[in-house]
Amino acid sequence: MAPNVTSSPTEVLCTAESTLPASNEVRSEEEKPTLKYRREIVWPNVVMHIYLNSAALYGGGILGITAGVHRLWSHRAYRATWQLRLILMLLHTLAFQTSAHEWVRNHRVHHKHSDTDADPHNVRRGFFFTHYGWMLVRKHPAVKEKGKQIDCSDIDADPFLVFQKRYYIILMPILCFLIPTAVPVYLWGETWTNAYHIAAVLRQVVTLHMTLITNSITHWPDTWRKRPYDKNIYPSENFMVSLLTLGEGWHNFHHVFPWDYKTAEIGGNRINPTTRFIDWCARIGWAYDLKTVPMSVVKRRIERTGDGTHEIWGWGDKDMTMRDKDLVEVINKEAM
């Protein structure tokens, strides 16, 4: 007989065995009816997460426009390392707004010949044309002529943009339609139809229209629009456009100082998430040589050509001109 083994069970074993329920007792526990549970959707949470996921796709795609093909490549308002350039190229392709080469050429022509026949989306041809119609018709001969004069050698020298242009017909469907459709289908069981029309098509169309409103709404020549930097041009300041486009609505400033990476003054009620993104990239070393306009230059331009609508918060604001101060009438003065 092995050592320490007895014919009678040990106390420990007996104690352990005594705590185990009989098999019929286990079965009876399993067969007890559970409480009825009815799955109830928490709609506020559903709406919140739909918004968050949609905003992530929208924000990613539109950053490829605002921080990438617009401020970086069209205006060369800052420089970027290869990591940031690669990310912005992919995000721009996700947005499906033609190749960067064509986008940059059109935008540079737009700034050099704004609101003339050489402007691809000339606002003088009507609101629908400047918003959407210009993509549906042949280009005006002046657009073609002036477009040939635009220097895009810097775009042709960027290997990421050369790669994008060469393989755009392959990259764009994958990034803009295939991946956004496949993710909902395989990760949470969405139908192909819903995923394609919402995550891919709807997202792309919303991003497109948010880009186009900077051509139409901010250029529309209404007399009540604010043009604090130059009253002699059509582009104007628009808070709502900036809210929808991550900071692209401060358009009067942008057309006066197109090389400023902020595309606006910073401060007050000016919403500009794209500038915050570029600033963050600068902090981690991905963005550098950020170009901006000194406030002294901005102030002189305001006084020279502005329409007098430059925002001030009240008496004593640093942007309040001496002329405005001299015109102030003070009533019920404090007794000496």
Image (tube, rainbow, N blue to C red):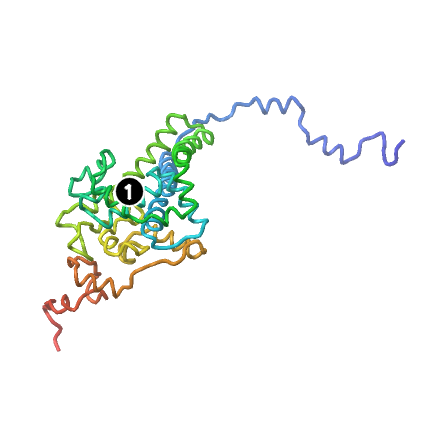
Image coordinates for residue 28, horizontal then vertical, percent:
60, 22
**Does 33 sit above or below residue 81?**
above
Q: Residue at x 23, y 35 (%)?
A: 138
Q: Is residue 233 left or right of residue 160?
A: left
The quarter of the picture where residue 259 lies is bottom left
Quick check: can you spot residue 204?
A: yes
- Across and down, in percent, residue 31 comes to 57, 21
Residue type at mark 1 is Thr
Q: Is residue 244 above or below residue 332?
A: above
Q: Tell me residue 253's x, y (percent).
A: 24, 55
Look at the image and tell me whether residue 48 can be seen: no
Name the residue at 42% across, 41% down: 163
Looking at this view, is 232 or 317 the one in front? 232
Residue 192 image point, x, y percent: 40, 26
**Which image quadrant: the N terminus?**
top right
Which residue carries the number 1 mark?
211
The crowd level at tag 1 (other Cα within 10 Å; few <14, some 14-19, many 20+) is: many
Quarter of image, res 24: top right
Q: Residue placed at 21% from the left, 48% from the top?
A: 114
